[in-house]
Amino acid sequence: MATTTQFLLFTALFSFCLLTSAALSRSVSQTRTAVLDVSSSLQQTLQILSFDPQTLQPFNDETVTMSFLNSSSSFSLPLHSRELVLKTQHEDYKSLLQSRLERDSSRVNSLVTKLQLALNNFDRHDLKPLETQIRPEGLNTPIVSGASQGSGEYFSRIGVGTPPKQFSMVLDTGSDVNWLQCQPCTDCYQQYDPIFDPRSSSSYRALSCDSKQCGSLDVSACRSNNCLYQVSYGDGSYTVGSFATETVSFGNSGSVNSVALGCGHDNEGLFVGSAGLLGLGGGALSLTNQIKASSFSYCLVNRDSTGSGILEFNSPQNGDAVRAPLLKNSKVDTFYYVGLTGFSVGGQSVQIPPSLFQMDDSGDGGIIVDCGTAITRLRTEAYNSLRDSFKKMSPNLKSTSGVALFDTCYDFSGMSSVKVPTVSFQFSGGKTLNLPAKNYLIPVDSMGTFCFAFAPTSSTMSIIGNVQQQGIRVGFDLANSRVGFTPNKC
């Protein structure tokens, strides 16, 4: 009897061990993974430091056909990185990264401040310009990464004026006012192109102080019935000048008349290389609203790349895109909020309360998609859960000390590639976007140190940054209030 009992007990225990082992095996085999190409990433960190823009042929600015676009015209432009404009002065990749992250933190602060002013019902007409002296007075475009100057920005070439002169302009989905440096300069920074002189353009028109466009500015002033503007950014950069309308042209696709833009005579800060900025936000003065675009999309190249992506307006939406609701904030119309519900790591959902990504009735909270912010910022509780899930599912990765705002870093020196758990965005409606490994594990030096490229924020607003967007076509269907993400469609 005892022998029989022992045999049954042994059989049950053996069966339990087999089942447990099988369950663990299935768990491991079912973990969704991605391969990080370590060698390629490190090679790019070296190439960007040694890259000399003078080795490239000058920008091939096509002769512009002066046909005028209507609101349904589809057009596109190449997008380029700033390293095609100016050679970096950083001697090593780690110092370049730290410079980029410092600027990125300032960028995030400026977005948060903009939201807080709106939430606190601060009247924009109470904002006063700084005391500064101003001297009287289908289209296709490529996108380029601005990483070599530590900016994390992307650039495109557009034509301004009649006859059109071509300029490299920063793209920014987090602001609305378009502007470029203008002669005569009280203070202008170095840019790749000759500075625009409005006196050489037959289509330049100063805006009056009582114009609708002048009334839409957050900060404005009046001089001799001419509208003056000022835009300040979180890193201390600013532009001040005359507010006017001009003809803007897009390659050989055509032109748009009477686009309101700032003609900056006093411009300071970290814009070096670009001639100015194209505001692609949701406000009334943004380029997208002024040309009445029903949609636009962009594809950003790797931030350390010398290649180009593309910016498109009114192009057809990709049928295989991962779509999510595009949400509006009644307090601030600039930002593009998206319906994000959470994350998964290795194919398993991370336990994060969905409320951490939701915008409340007052306009507080939520998560925006922004091409001007580099590193995705998540509310601290959400970030901690995502980070801990990643660390739990990657116990075999060799950890190392944190760098700057990154607290989770790994030593991949001597490795050509490594398999890591896949990180995915989960959107409203059950849609999932799987990120490539290079979009969440990025090099912080040229020796093999990689860090988990997310960061916590004490702000209630979260931000999906451009590191997580690289290599993914991001399409904003403005007419139907949707945003789509299409991997490998650049």
Image: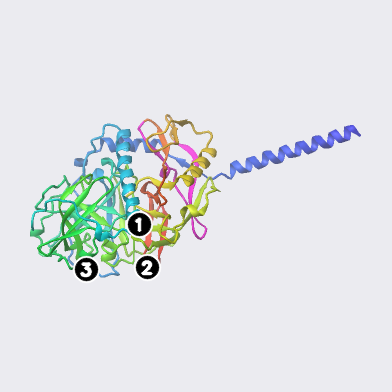
Residue at the spot of label 1: 120
Task: Decide if residue 14 is on the left or right side of residue 485.
Answer: right
At 75% from the left and 39% from the top, the residue drawn is: 15
Marks 2, 1: nearer the viewer = 1
Residue at the spot of label 3: 212
Q: In the image, is residue 144 above or below residue 405?
A: below
Q: Do the residues labelled 3 and 1 touch (CB within 8 Å)?
A: no
CA–CA distance between discs 3 and 1?
25 Å
* Residue 23 placement (x, y as % from top left): 66, 42
Q: Is mark 1 on a helix, strand or loop?
A: loop
- Neighbour class for label 3 at 10 Å: few (<14), some, many (≥20)? few
Q: Residue 126 colored magenta? A: no
Residue at the spot of label 2: 479
Q: In the image, is residue 319 above or below residue 472?
A: below
**Is residue 398 among the parts visible in the rendering?**
yes
Q: Are marks 2 and 1 in contact (CB under 8 Å)?
A: no
Marks 3, 2: nearer the viewer = 3
Decide which of tag 3 and tag 1 comes sooner along the chain. Answer: 1
What amino acid type should be assigned to the residue bearing mark 2? Ala
**Most foreground residue, 5 or 380:** 380
**Residue 260 figure quarter:** bottom left
CA–CA distance between discs 2 and 1?
29 Å
